[in-house]
């Protein structure tokens, strides 16, 4: 009897131990599976962020079905080395017009101006796209400011909508800089400038101002100003009112800009999408800055040289 009880006890202990081992292995397997799952989930999330940051996930991939309003943002100074260069803005506009579900395009601007060359390239592209897609309207919506180069671009739109407190206008051109000749003399520094060509040192900030060069610079500014004026006239036509005041380089509120014919009406992007374009859903086609670009900016920026940065800073702003 005792032997039987011992045998049953041994079997029970053996069975219990085996069950414990299997349970432990099962728990370890389950924990390992969950660990693999969470690792895959983390990697998927990181890869999604990476693709989005590099610009590999375009806006038109996720546009969905049904008509929408396409949005392109222009924020900040317009310059070749900024996110607001002609290539980026034009790429966003092109994708917006090409999307089969686009009912209308909004270019939302919040910019004090910038390069006349970059602004002119965007202006030209807007006209090209409007001619290529005549059934798709393009409206500019102004936020805080749309001045100089910003307005150079806006003038190409079908209509311009503003907030009553927006800042508009500044249709003019400027060239600014500094003269350091007196400072150099006080510091006992001698300027040694060697050139081949009598005007190669044009507007050098460390040399005395040359009246001939100043007059030539003023003529160039006047020429660019006339180009700007013609662009605005081509875009706004007979909607413009007092032209002598408009082209003076002055700025006005959004409410006053409507009276002058620089803008058409009050309205936000949401309002234009819902009430004007009749496609309330907004899809953003703005070209985003990728991780590579952000990294390059942190590491350092390659410049084209001292002369273009300091001697010829003419901007429509």
Image (tube, rainbow, N blue to C red):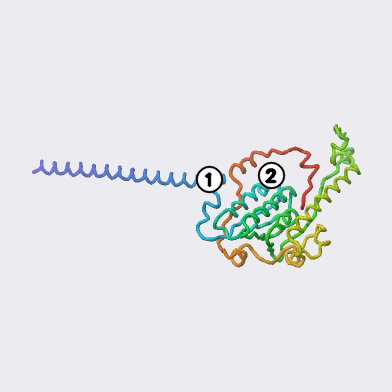
Residue 135 image offset from top left, x and y in percent? 61, 60
Secondary structure beneath dot 2 equals loop
| Residue drawn 56% across the image and 64% down it | 280
Q: How many marks?
A: 2
**Residue placed most toward the observer, 242 or 282:** 242
| Residue drawn 79% across the image and 47% down it | 314
Dot 1 alpha-carbon crowd within 10 angstroms: few under 14, some 14 to 19, many 20 or more: some
- Residue ID for mark 1: 51
| Residue drawn 78% across the image and 39% down it | 307
Residue 70 placement, left or right of 181 = left
Secondary structure beneath dot 1 equals helix
User: Image height check: is 158 above or below 227?
Assistant: below
**Residue placed most toward the observer, 34 or 25:** 34
Between disc 1 and disc 2, whose residue precedes? 1
Residue 138 image offset from top left, x and y in percent? 64, 59
Residue 306 image offset from top left, x and y in percent? 77, 38
| Residue drawn 58% across the image and 53% down it | 98
User: Image height check: is 249 above or below 52?
Assistant: below
Point out which mark residue 81 bears: 2
Residue 65 image offset from top left, x and y in percent? 50, 58
User: Image height check: is 246 above or below 81?
Assistant: below
**Residue placed most toward the observer, 254 or 298:** 254
Quadrant of residue 252 in the image? bottom right
Q: Quadrant of the N terminus?
A: top left
């Amino acid at each position: 009897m005792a032997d039987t009880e011992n045998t049953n006890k041994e079997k029970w202990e053996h069975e219990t131990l085996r069950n414990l081992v299997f349970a432990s292995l099962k728990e370890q397997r389950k924990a390992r599976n969950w660990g693999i799952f969470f690792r895959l989930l983390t990697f998927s999330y990181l890869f999604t962020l990476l693709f989005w940051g590099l610009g590999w996930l375009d806006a038109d991939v996720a546009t969905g079905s049904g008509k929408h309003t396409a949005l392109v943002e222009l924020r900040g100074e317009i310059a070749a080395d900024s996110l607001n260069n002609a290539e980026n803005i034009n790429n966003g506009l092109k994708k917006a017009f090409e999307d089969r579900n686009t009912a209308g395009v909004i270019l939302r601007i919040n910019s004090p101006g910038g390069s006349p060359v970059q602004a002119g390239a965007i202006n030209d592209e807007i006209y090209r796209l409007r001619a290529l897609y005549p059934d798709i309207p393009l409206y500019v919506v102004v936020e805080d400011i749309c001045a100089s180069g910003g307005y150079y671009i806006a003038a190409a739109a079908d209509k311009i909508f503003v907030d009553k407190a927006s800042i508009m206008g500044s249709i003019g051109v400027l060239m600014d800089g500094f003269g350091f000749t007196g400072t150099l003399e006080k510091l006992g520094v001698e300027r040694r400038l060697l050139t081949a060509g009598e005007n190669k040192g044009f507007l050098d900030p460390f040399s005395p101002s040359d009246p001939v060069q100043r007059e030539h610079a003023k003529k160039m500014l006047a020429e660019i100003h006339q180009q700007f004026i013609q662009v605005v006239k081509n875009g706004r036509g007979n909607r413009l009112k007092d032209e002598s005041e408009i082209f003076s380089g002055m700025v006005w509120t959004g409410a006053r800009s409507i009276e002058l014919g620089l803008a058409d009406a009050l309205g936000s992007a949401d309002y234009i999408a819902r009430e004007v374009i009749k496609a309330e859903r907004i899809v953003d086609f703005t070209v985003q800055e990728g991780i590579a670009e952000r990294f390059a900016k942190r590491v350092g920026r390659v410049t084209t040289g001292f002369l273009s940065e300091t001697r010829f800073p003419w901007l429509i702003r």
